[in-house]
Every structure is written in structure tokens, then in C-alpha cells.
Image: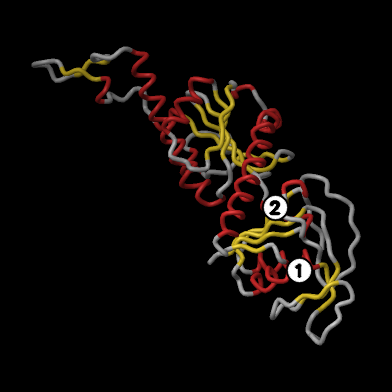
Amino acid sequence: MLFRVASSLPQRVAMDERFCILPLIPLATAVERFDLLALTGRTARIYTGAPEELMPVDLGPALQGSSDVVGELRRADVIDEDTLEPHRVRASSGVARALHGGFRSRQEDVDADTERFFREVDHTILDHISHADRRPLFVVALGEHAAVFRHLSKNPFLEGTIPRDPSRLTAMELSRLVQPLLAEARQQRAERLVVSYAKSLEKGLASGDPAEIARMAVAGRVGTLLVEAGRAEAGCFNPATGEIGWNGCTGTDVLAKRTDLFTAISEAVLLHDGDVITLPRILMPNENGMAAIARF
């Protein structure tokens, strides 16, 4: 079996009855994948991916309107500036016509329409992208536009904004701008998980004992599993009961198979729709190499 990944992986040789999936887990579960919005007053380009591979999102013709650029929304498709909109119109008594301008300045019209455009962009991203992939969203825009978008956005996955003009930046340049925010988001997520584990442990809803975690995993009770990155421990694992044995696997459990326990337990958590998050050793809340937060 061959997997194509965007970044290099640590070299590791393992002989087992199952594939060693731990090196692949961070690519799917860590804060490495994200969505990015390159926003100006007239266009919005939407990307998704990882630092090494940022791709425009194919929104389809129904959403992109007249734009021939994949992943781009245009203000002209949201707001027809030639249309007599209520905030621009003043009635003229006795004459069946309307006058542009009304009681508002041109700058006020532009500001109001910019907000309308930003709201439509926010709505599109939330409904068609963020709700589905639940990835952090970063915005690259001029300071004023970034502040307006952040103020009106309803997207709970909005992580941070970068005050730069994205109109002349390539996808690779945009990706490099996100790196500091991505590192900060990764650190904050790890800290939140460790705090959540500590609180759950106090309530009896977490465990740092690998034997107990293994039984919880096969029963589908692990909501989030924290695993020390790069760690492996040889042992035996029974996928039916969750019973484990270390080293020589002495015991009477004939159904248990020799394997890497960290891979086997992580796989069991994933098979029951749990989350597996790899953390560096310094951030792990215990010395056992794994910590589990229960669903219930």
C-alpha cells in the first residue's frame, strides 16, 4: 500500500500484522490542515490544505458566479452596483424616478456594500466549507478589511487574521504567512487538550493507564486519545476484549496478537470514531505515553 503525503516522514521499520499508522495520524488530526481566505474589498480567494500544499477550493459555478478563477468569489456577483438599492436612493416628489446618492456619501455606500460582501463570503465559507471540514480558518487581508471581517464573522473556526494585501500574493506566499499563526494554534490546541484531560481525570472520565485505555478503546468509550509522538511498545493486544500484555506476552489469552500497542490502541480508537492526537513528549500529561479522555 502506498500513501502520498505532502511532507517528509521520520524513517521507521516495523514488522507487524497491521500497518503502522501512527506516523500518518498527525497529517489527518493535528492542526496542520487549515482553510485560508485571501480577502480584498472586491474579491475573496478560498484555499484549503497544509503548509506544503495549499489548493484553491472548488466552489462550483453556482457559488463562484462569473469568476473564472477556482475558489474565487467576486463582489460584483453579490452586489450589483448599478442597481438602485434602498440605502442609495432618495425619492423625488411628483416624478417617477429616483436619484443616486440620497443622504449618504459614496464612501458610506462603499463601506456598507463591503460589509454585505464580507457577510456573503463568511456565510459561504461557513456553510460550504467549515461545517464540513471543521478546520481552522485564517484570513489574509488589509488591516481595515481584516478587522471588519473578524467583527462580523459568525465562523467559530476563525483562528486569526494577517494584515497584508493578498492581491499580489501566490498560494505559497500566503501559506508562509500563516506559519506563525499555525504554530500558535497548534500549541494552544495541545494546551487545551492537556487541561481538558486533567479536568476529566478529576471527574473519573479519563485515564493514563494503558491497560484501562485499551479496554476503553475497544468499547468505544475513548473520545480523545493523546499519544506520545514517535513512541512504540511491543506487546500483545486482543481486539475483542482490549486485554494487553507487555514484552513476552505471557498469559492465557490465546486471541491476543503480538503488535505495537500504541498503534493497536490508536487504531481501535479511530475505528470507533474517536480522535487520536500525537503530542511531543514534553507536552504529554504523564510518562506512560498515552492519555485518554472518555466520551462518557
Total marks placed: 2
Q: Position of residue 76 (x, y in %)?
A: 43, 28
Residue type (three-letter) at the residue carrying disc 2:
Pro
| Left or right, residue 140 beside residue 74 | right
Comes first in the chain, label 2 or label 1: 1
- From the viewer's side, name the closer residue of 291 and 16: 291
Q: Position of residue 215 (x, y in %)?
A: 67, 74
**Residue 135, label in figure:** none
The quarter of the image holding the N terminus is bottom right
- From the viewer's side, name the closer residue of 193 and 38: 193
Rounded to the nearest whole Å, what is the CA distance between mark 2 and mark 1?
21 Å
Work out whether 254 lies above or below 45. Answer: below
Work out whether 21 lies above or below 98. Answer: below
Picture quadrant of residue 287: bottom right
| Left or right, residue 15 beside residue 270 | right
**SS at circle 2:** loop
**Residue 264, label in figure:** 1
- From the viewer's side, name the closer residue of 130 and 279: 279
Work out whether 151 lies above or below 135. Answer: above
* Residue underneath mark 2: 285
Q: Residue at x 81, y 59 (%)?
A: 2
- Residue lying farthest to the front in this orientation: 202
Residue type (three-letter) at the residue carrying disc 1:
Ala
